[in-house]
Image (cartoon, helix red, strand yellow):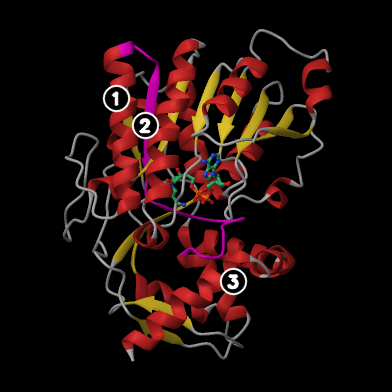
Amino acid sequence: MANYVTGLFNFFDDGESNTSSKIVLVTGGAGFIGSNFIRFLLKKYPDYKIINFDKLTYAGNLNNLVTIEENPHYVFVRGDVANVKDVKNVFEEFNPHFVVHFAAESHVDRSILNPDIFLQTNILGTQNLLNHAREHQIEKFVQISTDEVYGSIGKGESCHEESPLCPNNPYAASKASADFLIRVAHQTYGQRVNIVRSCNNYGTYQFPEKLIPVMIYNSLINEELPVYGDGRNIREWIHVEDNCRAIDLVLHNGRSGEIYNVGTGEEWENVKLAEFLLKQFPESKSHIQFVLDRQGHDFRYSVKTDKIKKELGWKPQIDFKEGIEQTILWYKSHLDWIEQINSGEYMQYFKETYESRLTESN
Ligand SMILES: NC(=O)c1ccc[n+]([C@@H]2O[C@H](COP(=O)([O-])OP(=O)(O)OC[C@H]3O[C@@H](n4cnc5c(N)ncnc54)[C@H](O)[C@@H]3O)[C@@H](O)[C@H]2O)c1
């Protein structure tokens, strides 16, 4: 399926290459965190060249990258990480130094409805990339993983990088499987790899099926704010830019073969978070609506972050309440971005998912 969309000619012929310049293959760069990471890289490393390799599933949106699409150091390639030919072509064409692998099916509810595509993309896709990365002897492969691989934990507990993996839903199981394949690439083949496991991200360009954008958008349009179960489940939140800073440090300075947790300790019960977000919209006529709980809904995740702090000097810089304020302002000024998404497949999915949950919980 691979086809080039933007920037190819300039990408090779700008005459600015030097030895510190790196070519970075970013998979899933049209999604939420990937698009933020591409903007971050282009700003911090103006010499670097970035290939955004993305299948453009329902979650991939090139509108996330309009601010940099003319940058001569950026090129978009449409392709599927699980397709051998697509991945072979992109490695042969661009010969990257680094791979930062964000591409994934990423929504837990969708994984419960249809696990197969999660295994295809998240597990087989990762192995496919690793095979080509090995063949091309790339300098570093960074796997973007999640705190969900550790599974649900009680209050007062926190997982460190060597804690056992106990995923409880198909999404988390597929990410945990991919993490094991990364480990194998290092242990068996000596590939230079890292794994980054972060808590929940929020910020600009997050697809409006995830908790914070759903709450913001529904408050803006006076719709109900759906909260699963009794709303007591706890999640830890990080601003996407703090996560991008962490990934950058791991890419450049992380010890090969190591896993790094990324978190903030900013924990919120889902219902408290919904109440807090709703308060930011005093004019809104929205209210919280409890809906049928997610099957196998994990109670709480929490990660210890001493390792990345001590080894790489990372710490979060964006205060949660300030980050939320900025995020709300961004969504308010980008309603057209959401409305373009909502006009299509996603709206149908949203209606089916939440309307059936409401019916079942009443
Ligand atoms: N969002 C979070 O809070 C969070 C937290 C921890 C870890 N992560 C991980 O970070 C990564 C990015 O998450 P996100 O929230 O930006 O996801 P997202 O759903 O917004 O974006 C995923 C991107 O991957 C692309 N993609 C999907 N299948 C593909 C395939 N087969 N080949 C090529 N591209 C494909 C999509 O088109 C989309 O652009 C994921 O690996 C996810 O597991 C996310």
Residue that appears at 32% across and 17% down: 186
The residue at which mark 1 appears reads as: 183
Q: Looking at the image, is mark 3 or mark 1 earlier in the sequence?
A: 1
Is 155 on the left or on the right of 357, as rendered?
Answer: left
Q: Is mark 3 within 8 Å of ligand 1?
A: no
Magenta range? 189-210
| SS at circle 1 | helix
Label 2 neighbourhood size at 10 Å, few (<14), some (14-19), many (20+)?
A: many
Is residue 190 inside the magenta stretch?
yes
| Residue type marked 3 | Met
| SS at circle 2 | strand
Res. 51 in view: yes
Q: Is mark 1 within 8 Å of ligand 1?
A: no
The residue at which mark 2 appears reads as: 195
Task: Name the spot of residue 139 as percent of width and height, x first.
Answer: 49, 14
Q: Residue 294 bears which disc, if any?
A: none
Residue that appears at 56% across and 57% down: 206
Which residue, as the protein is rendered here, is positioned at the far top?
A: 19
Q: Are marks 1 and 2 in contact (CB under 8 Å)?
A: yes
| Residue type marked 1 | Arg
In this view, the mark in front (1 or 2): 1
Picture layout, residue 325 above or below residue 122: below
| Residue type marked 2 | Ile
The residue at which mark 3 appears reads as: 347
In this view, the mark in front (3 or 1): 3
| SS at circle 3 | helix
Is residue 236 inside the magenta stretch?
no
